[in-house]
Image (cartoon, grey):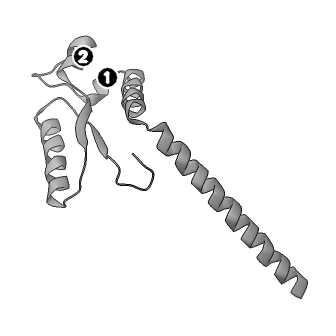
Amino acid sequence: MMYGSKREVHIYTLVDYDLSGAHIHNSFIDQLNKFNIEYSEISNIAITEEQIEKYSLPKHKGEVQLQALNPMILRDLITETCNNNWDVDIYQKRNYIQEIMNKYYRKKLNKNLLNITKKL
């Protein structure tokens, strides 16, 4: 995808594994649709059924709270999700353009400052 073109938007949630967590996720989707906000993907990073089994998370009445997940595991899940969707090419192009703009404005600012000091 080219820089400056329409970008894909990925939205990720972190919610409890219970009815309120499911409601938050679904309500979020409803709100995005209500306001015509386009997105490519919306998915839940945590907590999922697979994570409950994989990490032996404690259930209380069939529910699991997000804080039951080890913070380091949560950090790794978020990092992995972001890394899987990070477009290095777009990031590098954006930084290159920003660098050019900074040089242009610095040069213009220096010229203006020089003109001002000459008038003093």
Question: Which quarter of the rendered picture does the N terminus lie within?
Answer: top left
Q: Work out which residue is located at the far bottom of the displayed protein and give it.
A: 119
In the foreground, 5 or 101: 5
Which disc number belongs to residue 69? Answer: 1
Q: Which numbered disc, 2 or 1, marks the residue that appears first in the sequence? A: 2
In the foreground, 87 or 41: 87
Image x and y of residue 83, in percent: 42, 31
Which residue occupies 24% across, 16% down?
57
**Label 2 – label 1 distance at C-alpha:** 7 Å
| Whether residue 120 is visible | no
Neighbourhood count class around disc 2 (C-alpha, 10 Å): few under 14, some 14–19, many 20 upward: some
| Whether residue 102 is visible | yes
Image x and y of residue 84, in percent: 38, 30
In the foreground, 78 or 85: 85
Q: Tell me the amino acid under the disc marked 2.
A: Leu
Q: Are marks 2 and 1 in contact (CB under 8 Å)?
A: yes
Helix, strand or loop for disc 1: loop
Image x and y of residue 101, in percent: 63, 61
Which disc number belongs to residue 57? Answer: 2
Which residue occupies 79% across, 74% down?
111
Q: Is residue 77 left or right of residue 27?
A: right
Neighbourhood count class around disc 1 (C-alpha, 10 Å): few under 14, some 14–19, many 20 upward: some
Q: Tell me the amino acid under the disc marked 1.
A: Leu
Image x and y of residue 85, in percent: 38, 35
Which disc number belongs to residue 32? Answer: none
